[in-house]
Image (cartoon, helix red, strand yellow):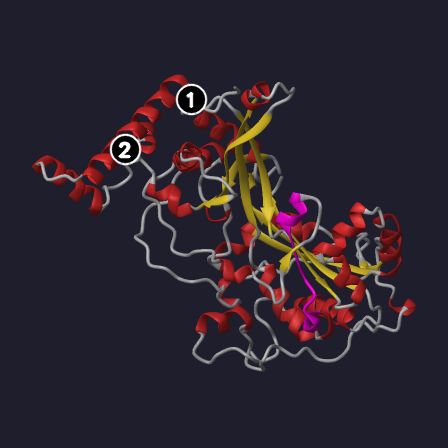
Amino acid sequence: MGQPADLASGAASTHSLQNVSSDDLAPPSYEQVTAESSSQPSTNTHNANATYPTRLIDVDTNIPGGSRAVSASSRVRDTTIVTLYPELSSNPRTLYTAFAQQIHLPPRPQLLIAGTHTDSTKKKQDKKNGSDVVTDFDFRVDLAETLLKGWESLDSAALWHTVEVARDFDGVKTYRGTRLKTASWASTKRNVSGRLGPIQLSDNEGVPEDDDEERRLVQPETDEQGQHDRRFVSERDQDDFMVWCERFCHDPSPVKSFTLHRQVCGFNHQAVINCLKSHIRDINYRGAISMQLVVSKSTITVYSPHWINRLRNHGVVYWVFILTQLWILAWPVIWLLERRYEVVNSSWYASCTEEDSTGHSRARTYAHGRDEHALGEFWAPAVKQAAWARRTNGEIVSRDDAQRLQGLTTEQLLRGTVGSDSQAEIERRQRMQRGEGSFVDSVVGLARGVNEVRQGWNMSMGWGGNV
């Protein structure tokens, strides 16, 4: 794979909106936090004290009326955000403002990590065949802030982030307000023009005057005339995106949708998975380990607020149709009525290749200076502790957890010596040493001792095996 910027600019069927300098773009809408400066880690090693000046906060990835998609597939629920907010399907300015923000925000690549074992003890006691599956741990690792670059500062966005917008007669087949993929916009079939007047930028209605962070979310940086959104290279680039917003909003079809796709490129997640699995085995876990990469919030779809779209996105109605097999009749009806717009793609690169003058690849550059193995080593302490602590219910392991545990040995991680004991525990020990401990203090000490013995037994004999 060549450099992302070259791929985007070389494609005749797409149009890059990103190859611009930071002086021509508005600052990203992220909360700035104070952090100590440190050197960036090399490709094959990681710096335990590495810090990041900005944070990717969840509020920035929200969209008006957005919610998780209703689907029988857990992957679709994890990756897709849908909204039926009326303004987004009727007002081109509102749609432009919301999606222009979302285009320049990354998805959230996450590793889903689970450990299970089978327990047939109860079945045998009941004289029944079979076994129960027991979940030992089930959590997620949020890789976004340590994998992707360009969202925190637009200085390097042209290298690590590209945006492609379909253009008329570009020859690429995609959904352009049609049932099937087409290579051009067929505006003559429906009374929808390609250009419907001058672009009107957001006037920030409903945004508090003192809320600077929220104002940056919706207010583009404009030129002296106040019309050119400088997040795009030129007014023509801006028009390429705005024209699709107008076509969608002025499409008379009652059932329609507008979709943004975001994807992560240049990332060998299997190498990270193999590294983390070996670290979990290092704590003597004997159960089955499953890991998979899910790119959360990779798809955002705006639906028109028609009753058909409302029913298809209603949880109870959806499952009634699935269980009663009515979807066999409903799906063809939706396919015939819906006009789909899938004309925008945002690609985020975790790595890219450097080419010499002959066009041959000679090196690979990583966004944060870590290859996949080094990234796995960075997350390994947090993953080991999360598995050992039996974290479940899809709990998120964050970058803060990984940074806090850097440099600790496996014994320190498992015995809970990450930092000092609580003040209450220190006082309890002091009372016991002075001979002033109460019965409750003795019980607490006994419980802690039993827990340490159990941990030692699990570490030496293994845990999570089938029984």
Q: Tag 1's secondary structure?
A: loop
Q: Is residue 27 left or right of residue 73?
A: left
**Vertical order, 422 against 339 (above or below):** above
Q: Which amino acid does label 2 sit on?
A: Arg
Q: Which residue is drawn at 59% across and 27% down?
A: 132
Direction right: furthest residue: 189
Tell which of 169 and 361 is nearer to you: 169
Q: In the rendered image, which residue does mark 2 sit on?
A: 448
Closer mark to the observer between disc 2 and disc 1:
2
Q: Which segment did they paint magenta? A: 74-88
Quarter of the N terminus within the rendering: top right
Which mark is drawn over residue 138?
A: none
Q: Is residue 85 magenta?
A: yes
Judge from the rendering whether residue 420 lies leftward or rightward of residue 191; answer left or right: left
- Whether residue 60 is situated above or below residue 465 in the rendered picture: below
Residue 14 shows in the view: no
Tell me the residue that label 1 is attached to.
284
- The secondary structure type at the circle numbered 2 is helix
Q: Is residue 101 above or below residue 417?
A: below
State the image coordinates of residue 115 (x, y, percent, origin top left): 52, 30
- Magenta segment: does it hold 210? no
Q: Quadrant of residue 334?
A: bottom right
Question: Does label 2 or label 1 sit earlier along the sequence?
Answer: 1
Q: Quadrant of residue 308?
A: bottom right
Residue 243, position as x, y percentages in the image:
74, 70
Q: Residue at x 30, y 35 (%)?
A: 416
Is residue 250 something one can see in this rendering?
yes
Instruction: Kindly identify the amino acid type of the residue bearing the numbered disc 1.
Output: Asn
